[in-house]
Amino acid sequence: MCLAIPGQIRELLPDDEMAVVDVMGVRRKISMQMLVDEPATEGDWVLIHVGFAMSKISDEDAREQLRVLEAMGDDADAQAEARGYAFGHAEDESGGPAS
Amino acid sequence: MKYVDEFRNAELIKRTAEEIRRLADPDRRYRIMEICGGHTHAIFRFGLHQLLPKNIDLVHGPGCPVCVLPSARVDEGLEIARGNDLIFTAFGDMMRVPGSHGSPLEAKARGAEVRMVYSPLDALKLAQDNPDRRVMFFAIGFETTTPSTALTILRARERGVSNFLVHCNHIMVPPPIRAILDMPDMTLDAFIGPGHVSTVIGCEPYRFIAEAYGKPVVVSGFEPTDLMQSIAMILRQFRDGRCEVENQYARALPWDGNPAARRAMETVFEPRESFEWRGLGFIPGSGYRIREEFAAFDAEAVCEAPGVTTLPSDPRARCGDVLKGALKPSECELFGTECTPETPVGALMVSSEGACAAQFKYAHVTISA
């Protein structure tokens, strides 16, 4: 339930307070709205929970977190979750108003 | 040490296990509750309890949101969706949580429109893609998850989405800990605090546990090393006669948590007077509801819940005693017989973060230090 998935920021989409992240090879949009107080930049690692970046973490911790997910048998779930984020596509298609 | 050896810090884990043995006073017992279900899962998965001396008991706390959700809320959510022709959406973990008349998955099998989502933003997208339908997100989770629902409601309002509803079952970590501490048969000595919840609420909300109840708290990360170090930190507090809140997870967890996430949460939600927890009963101020300002998104405010009947749960299921730490999962008569991860009677068997499912699944994990 409280899966925290490390992802690396590939592209910031500031108009929509979102970012494109790479999660174990899967590219998805996530919300950056929780990190307004500590802005992230491209290349930074973040912990992702239910489609939102929760906190910034170091490269080393991101790698260790990936190993923990794997050892816990949660890596497939984490990848399925990232792959399952569907909301990014709506933004692409509608080009909805920037918030 | 099969699983533990997979980590870069296997040597550190062994050293910490030795330190714990040195620190533990052989003339007393230590009963330490790990609050978070993620910690419970990790402890069983890596067999960490087997690295501890016999006089340290790990007690598995209430920090698994699907496990503590009472049948009545599942029943109400499904009934609101059915009675008002809503599309019911929820996280995957929620799908198998038993209500009195079955889980959301079973409701789906009977023809209800139930869909799994990975993010509340997915539920919002479903509403935007289906403007002629109303979509309800059945929201569960602790303070880790609550800000996501809050930000999704704020986004729905900004974008003028009028067919999106939330059935709010968000809950808080500190109130059930206070409730457990107030129980007359309480025998806990210390707490391992939840790492991810604390990235939102920070470490201050646990201060009452140390100051008013005299129990040490160490907020911990999720790696085997983190959990072992947190236990050593707790034992050092006992050795030094200290009683405080410490942050073992400082590399990812600022003491003050995430103020932006809390602002969103406080903008959209307010505490309920009381909320029911499976196995623990009603606990004052332990749940969130949607503020009146956002009532247009509140399924409980907008929709009637006609004819919800909740059946009493199986009296033989001892989930409450397990949650309180008064009973080990395997001591319940239903454990592993009638109640299994495939056929859960109680919710602690539903999620791998629940004490019963974790013990059932990993009972075979044995390690030698």
Image (spheres, coloured by chain):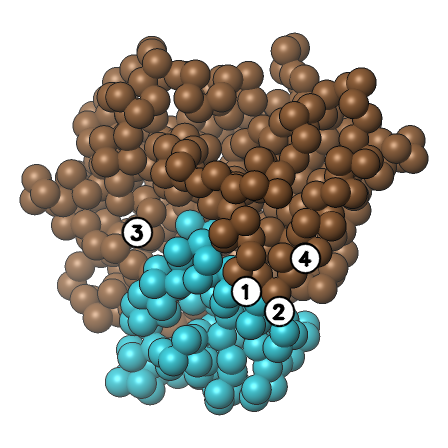
Chain colours: A cyan, B brown
Q: Residue at x 60, y 51 (%)?
A: B224
Q: Residue A61: which numbered mark, if any?
A: 2
Crowding at mark 1 (Cα within 10 Å: few <14, some 14-19, many 20+) = some
Q: CA distance from mark 4 to mark 2?
A: 18 Å
Give the vertical position of A90 relative to A4 (above or below).
Answer: below
Give the vertical position of B180 relative to B51 (above or below).
Answer: above
- Most distant residue in the front direction: B368
Q: CA distance from mark 1 to mark 4?
A: 18 Å
Are the residues at dot 4 and dot 3 in contact (C-beta closer than 8 Å)? no
Whether callout 1 and callout 3 share a subunit is answered no
Percent position (x, y) of residue B84?
18, 44
Observer able to see residue B142: no
Are the residues at dot 1 and dot 4 in contact (C-beta closer than 8 Å)? no
Whether callout 4 and callout 2 share a subunit is answered no
- Label 2: which secondary element: helix
Crowding at mark 3 (Cα within 10 Å: few <14, some 14-19, many 20+) = some
Percent position (x, y) of residue B199?
64, 57
Q: CA distance from mark 2 to mark 3?
A: 27 Å
Question: Which of the two residues, B192 or B139, is positioned nearer the viewer here?
Answer: B192
Which residue is the site of mark 1?
A65
Give the amino acid type for the residue marked by disc 3 in the picture. Gly
Which residue is the site of mark 3?
B92
Name the chain under label 1: A
Q: Residue at x 78, y 31 (%)?
A: B24
- Most distant residue in the right direction: B240
Q: CA distance from mark 4 to mark 3?
A: 37 Å
Give the amino acid type for the residue marked by disc 1 in the picture. Gln
- Label 3: which secondary element: helix
